[in-house]
Image (cartoon, coloured by chain):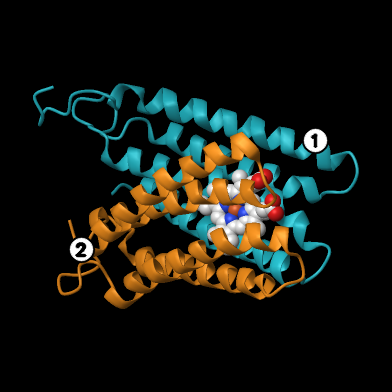
Chain colours: A orange, B cyan
């Protein structure tokens, strides 16, 4: 299992546990902006990240020389996805509590980073969806 | 990887790209307003990512990887049934995701049609892959 896959999967597992802890907090006392954080910790942090890690490892080889495509794109997808998600987790509830503050632009940055992470994965994975 | 799986998985990557783009617009708009119409993208965001990305990827990978020894007709099961599942799922994702944007009554009816199509996709897929959920011949259990 490649090193980056281990990072993806271990990070995904950490989000899995974190998401369920946030789910407990949400059920116990709610709070503005917490529901989307709970949902996305699960669907982005856990499920999508797990898929990214396993696909990077298991999909057909890109070529003999670079079996997993571009390392740079793969690392970029890991870094951007996680930086963006972490910023969202902080900024979304914070902005709900303090509207009109500097958390707004932070949330916008979280959006751009996660988008870049997703695009980097698609760009690096597309050509590996092949017969063998 | 068979041709059907390549279509499922490539389509799922397209939905990932489009769904993340919609999600990024929604999130950006929450932090820095872009326009009052942006929140209307939410149903498409949810449908594209849950059904178009996650579910479709699982269907494509299962079609590729599940044991296929001794299954009648073709090694991957019925190719026709797999294409039916592919067509119904993708038609359903669009109807359920983009349908709510249609004006008037249509905006209520199209998502129902979409969900029905997705149900058909699930049925065709499950019926076809059922026989492949078995010992692989490589592992003892
Ligand atoms: C596999 C990936 C994803 C899935 C399955 C998904 C699913 C969902 C679901 C189910 C909701 C509704 C949540 C609710 O009603 O509280 C939602 C809302 C939303 N999603 Fe995603 N999402 C994904 C990725 C993303 C990403 C990458 C972004 C941003 C870059 C994003 C931004 C949003 C926003 C802004 C909302 C609206 C939250 C609100 O204001 O209530 N999503 N998404």
What residue does disc 1 label?
Answer: B109
Tell me the subunit letter for badge 1.
Answer: B
Q: Residue at x 53, y 62 (%)?
A: B17
Question: Alpha-carbon distance for marks 2 and 1?
Answer: 48 Å
> x and y percent of residue B61 in the render?
34, 44
Q: Residues within 10 Å of mark 2 (few under 14, many from 20)?
A: few
> x and y percent of residue A52 in the render?
36, 57
Q: Nearer the viewer, residue A31 or B77?
A: A31
Residue A6, relative to residue A68: is it above or below?
Answer: above
Q: Going by the image, does A53 lie left or right of A104? A: left
Q: Nearer the viewer, residue A30 or B118?
A: A30
Q: Residue at x 73, y 64 (%)?
A: A98
Residue A17, relative to residue B23: is it above or below?
Answer: above
Tell me the subunit letter for badge 2.
Answer: A
Q: Mark 1: which secondary structure?
A: helix
What residue does disc 2 label?
Answer: A3
> x and y percent of residue A51 in the render?
37, 51
Q: Going by the image, does A70 lie left or right of B40? A: left
């Amino acid at each position: 299992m490649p090193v980056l896959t281990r990072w993806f999967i271990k990070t995904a597992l950490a989000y899995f546990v974190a998401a369920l802890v946030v789910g407990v907090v949400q059920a116990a006392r709610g709070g503005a902006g917490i529901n989307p954080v709970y949902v996305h910790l699960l669907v982005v942090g856990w499920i999508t990240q797990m898929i990214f890690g396993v696909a990077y490892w298991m999909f057909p080889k890109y070529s003999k020389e670079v079996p997993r495509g571009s390392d740079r794109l793969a690392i970029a997808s890991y870094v951007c996805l996680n930086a963006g998600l972490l910023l969202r987790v902080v900024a979304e509830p914070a902005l709900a509590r303090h509207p009109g503050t500097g958390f707004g632009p932070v949330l916008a940055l979280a959006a751009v980073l996660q988008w870049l992470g997703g695009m980097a994965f698609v760009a690096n994975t597309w050509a590996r969806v092949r017969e063998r | 990887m068979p041709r059907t799986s390549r279509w499922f998985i490539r389509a799922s990557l397209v939905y990932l790209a489009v769904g993340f783009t919609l999600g990024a617009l929604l999130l950006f708009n929450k932090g820095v307003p872009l326009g009052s119409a942006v929140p209307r993208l939410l149903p498409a965001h949810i449908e594209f990512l849950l059904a178009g990305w996650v579910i479709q990827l699982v269907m494509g990978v299962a079609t590729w990887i599940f044991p296929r020894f001794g299954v009648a007709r073709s090694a991957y099961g019925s190719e026709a049934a797999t294409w039916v599942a592919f067509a119904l799922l993708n038609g359903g994702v669009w109807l359920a995701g983009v349908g709510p944007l249609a004006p008037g009554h249509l905006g209520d009816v199209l998502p129902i049609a979409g969900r029905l199509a997705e149900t058909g996709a699930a049925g065709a897929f499950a019926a076809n892959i059922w026989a492949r959920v078995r010992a692989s011949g490589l592992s003892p259990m």
